[in-house]
Amino acid sequence: MSEKPTNNGSKDLKDVHLLRDEQILKHFGISRSCLYQWRKRKEIPFIKIGSTNYYIEEVIVKMLYLRAGRLPKDFDDTK
């Protein structure tokens, strides 16, 4: 009996897009110190590789929609 492997909701790494600090500052229209405070208070998830902070684009987009109070109907969280 061979079963097909399941995806279990995980994503292929080639589909993950990372943003840097400068891109986050532009998306949110905030200062560098504000972004630092968000990271410090764990309000925004990030990954630090070396001395560079990275943010997963899909998570940031979802945060933007949630701060606006809604997600679009076509927002697919399981791609």
Image: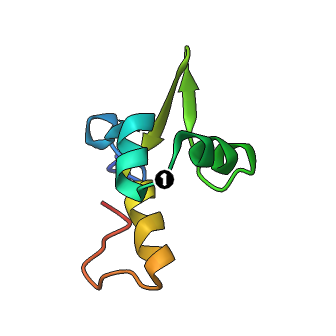
Residue 5 pos. (x, y %)? 36, 47
Q: Residue at x 60, y 49 (%)?
A: 34
On the rendered structure, is 39 left or right of 59?
right
Q: Is residue 70 visible?
A: yes
Q: Is residue 73 above or below residue 67?
A: below
Q: Disc count in the image?
A: 1
Q: Which residue is mark 1?
A: 30
**Nearer to us in this view, 21 or 47:** 21
Amino acid type of the residue tagged 1 in the rendering: Ile
Q: Is residue 32 above or below residue 69?
A: above
Picture residue at 61% right of the left edge, 42% below the top: 33
Q: Residue furthest right?
A: 41
For mark 1, give the secondary structure: loop
The answer to whether residue 1 shows anywhere in this view is: no
Image height of 49 relative to 37, above or below: above
Tell me which corner region of the image, top left, top right, bottom left or bottom right, holds residue 73.
bottom left
Quarter holding the C terminus is bottom left
Quarter holding residue 65 = bottom left
